[in-house]
Image: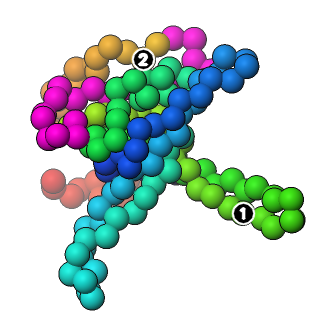
Amino acid sequence: MLNTLIAEGRLVKDPTLKITDNNFAYSRATIASKRGYKNRETQEYESDFIQLYLTKDNAKNFAKLCHQGDLISIIGRLQTDRQVGKDGKVTYYTNVIVSEFTLLTKKKGAAIQPQTTKATPHNSSYPFPSEEPPIDTNFEAMELPPSMPFHDTEY
């Protein structure tokens, strides 16, 4: 199943950083992401408010680098949880579990060098590669056997 979300928006307020008794770091934040169309009645753009959840070093870096008003982009996955209140009422809430974020601009519009961070996979024994391997663009045509569909089609 595919569950990937990519979004861009401005931080509504400074992110919170909490560290549990087990030394587990997590951060929560909200971004306002402007919709791509105007409201018919007001002729103004509306925003969606997206709840973010980050863990470990990703959470620490996010809380250190990002502040209210900063423009960021995120990559993550949607996760819906439920909570049962004392009155028995069930409340559902949706968060984006952020795996990667990029700080695009600071609040006052001063452009910065974009900084991207990635979450370390839970079961990984090696770090992410520091750079992408080169892509081989030297392709050769391949002969298809007559049993393959479209074997005589020219491309």
Residue 143 percent across, percent down from the top left: 25, 41
Q: Main secondary structure of the magenta part?
A: loop
Q: Amino acid at mark 2?
A: Phe
Mark 1 or mark 2, whichever is nearer to me: 1
Determine which of the numbered discs, if any, sits on residue 91 in the image.
Answer: 1
The total number of labels drawn is: 2
Q: Residue at x 66, y 16 (%)?
A: 23
Position of residue 103 relative to residue 152, above or below, is above
Horizontal and vertical percent for residue 155? 15, 53
* Residue beneath the point at 32% across and 14% down: 130
Residue 101 in which image quadrant: top left
Callout 2: few (<14), some (14-19), or many (20+) C-alpha neighbours within 10 Å? few
| Sequence-first disc among 1 and 2 | 1
Nearest to the observer: residue 65 or residue 127: 65
Q: Nearer the viewer, residue 119 or 2?
A: 119
**116 relative to 133, above or below:** below
**Does the rendering let one see residue 145?**
no
Front residue of 37/118: it is: 37
Q: Magenta segment, which residues?
A: 106-126
User: For the residue marked with disc 1, what is the amino acid?
Assistant: Thr
